Image (tube, rainbow, N blue to C red):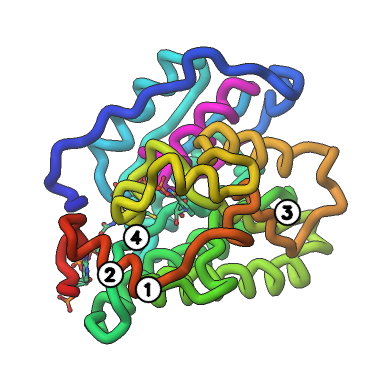
Amino acid sequence: MSRNDVIHKETCEENYKYIFKPDILRGKVAFITGGGSGICFTITEIFMRHGCDTVIVGRNLERVKQASETLMAATGGRCLPLSVDVRKPQQILDAVDEAMGQFGKIDILVNGAAGNFLCPLDQMSFNAFRTVMEIDAHGTFNVSKVVYDKSMKTNGGVIINITALLHLRGTQMQTHAGSAKAAIEAMTRHMAVEWGMNGVRVMCVAPGPIADTEGMRRLGGGRVNEEYEKSIPIQRLGLRVDIADVCLFLTTRGSELLTGTTIAADGGSWLTGSNNFYQTKKLLSAGHSLSKAKL
Ligand code: COA
Ligand code: NAP
């Protein structure tokens, strides 16, 4: 989706069922990149439903503003929307200063901003590969560094990096995103080692296929049907709220021994999913679009 496209209006959970006490994040502040849409919008919502103040950032100011209005109306919590490109350090410095000015600290950072598309390796331009590496991997480093320097170094905190399971087997048409997520997973372990003594825990949450998301619309390639769902051990796609609940757990005392690790939140799909390039190529050439890539 280009930044000029019509903004899809995000909606909140209609009937959220609490697992934890509704005030478990009262007094906490979360900074969430990519919080204006998809999975990270719902992570923001669930944090707010538990009393957390939030800051959401993305490139498109209108998108984050609209998301923040929806979130505040549904939860009664506070959400500061800011325009930031995670590839641009000065924009991050300014946004974190603004967040600190408003809330005084950042306890939780979710690095969810990402870019992706299906593209066979031999058709990927230098810039296409670099763009995804810069948004996902450099973006995670850039934002973590600023939030650590300005708040977590002295106050501690939890960093959750949203990755994926693409690189575990080497997924067709996902070399750029898989490489970026693998780099984030390594970075997570380095950060956990260096920042642990300052009271910072750093983890990855790696979603599998999640329904009603831009990621699935872009990457599903027409493969998502009943047969596909039945191939997943838990017999269904993940939901945004599943990922939000996992992230919530990682902010609680129940997860205090977890750091430097990756939670695969995919219902076991990576263990059983097909990774058949020729089958996908046939399916896509039968009518499913890859936007730019020519097969
Ligand atoms: N197939 C192949 N190459 C593609 C592509 C596609 N579908 N989409 C973009 N690219 C290439 C571009 O051609 C360009 O390379 P070039 O200069 O050699 O032509 C490069 O990627 C950068 O594209 P650009 O549109 O300038 O990047 P951007 O920084 O404006 O946007 C994207 C980043 C491309 C990742 C864009 O899709 C985006 O903004 N995504 C955010 C939402 C998203 O991806 N959600 C899913 C998360 S899982
Ligand atoms: P999404 O709705 O497209 O979310 C991506 C967000 O990142 C958008 O809000 C976008 O906002 C923001 N973003 C993109 N580039 C940015 C940049 N340079 N700077 C700042 N913000 C930027 O996608 P999603 O499907 O919910 O995915 C969310 C996360 O889950 C991603 O990390 C993705 O890799 C991961 N994931 C998703 C799935 C899935 O099934 N959907 C599976 C595995 C992993 P702007 O356009 O306004 O910048």
What percent of the width, then of the height, locates residue 194? 75, 71
Q: Which residue is mark 2?
A: 281
In the figure, residue 70 lies in which quadrant? Answer: top left
Disc 4 residue type (three-letter): Gly
3D distance between C-alphas at marks 1 and 4: 22 Å
Q: Which residues are magenta?
A: 29-50
Tell me the quarter of the image containing the C terminus: bottom left
Q: Mark 3 near mark 1, Cβ–Cβ under 8 Å?
A: no
Q: Mark 1 near mark 2, Cβ–Cβ under 8 Å?
A: yes
Q: Which residue is mark 3?
A: 154
Mark found first going from the N terminus, 3 or 2: 3
Kindly state the secondary structure of the residue where label 4 is placed.
loop
Q: Which residue is mark 1?
A: 277
Disc 2 residue type (three-letter): Lys
Q: Is residue 202 magenta?
A: no
Mark 3 or 4: in front is: 4
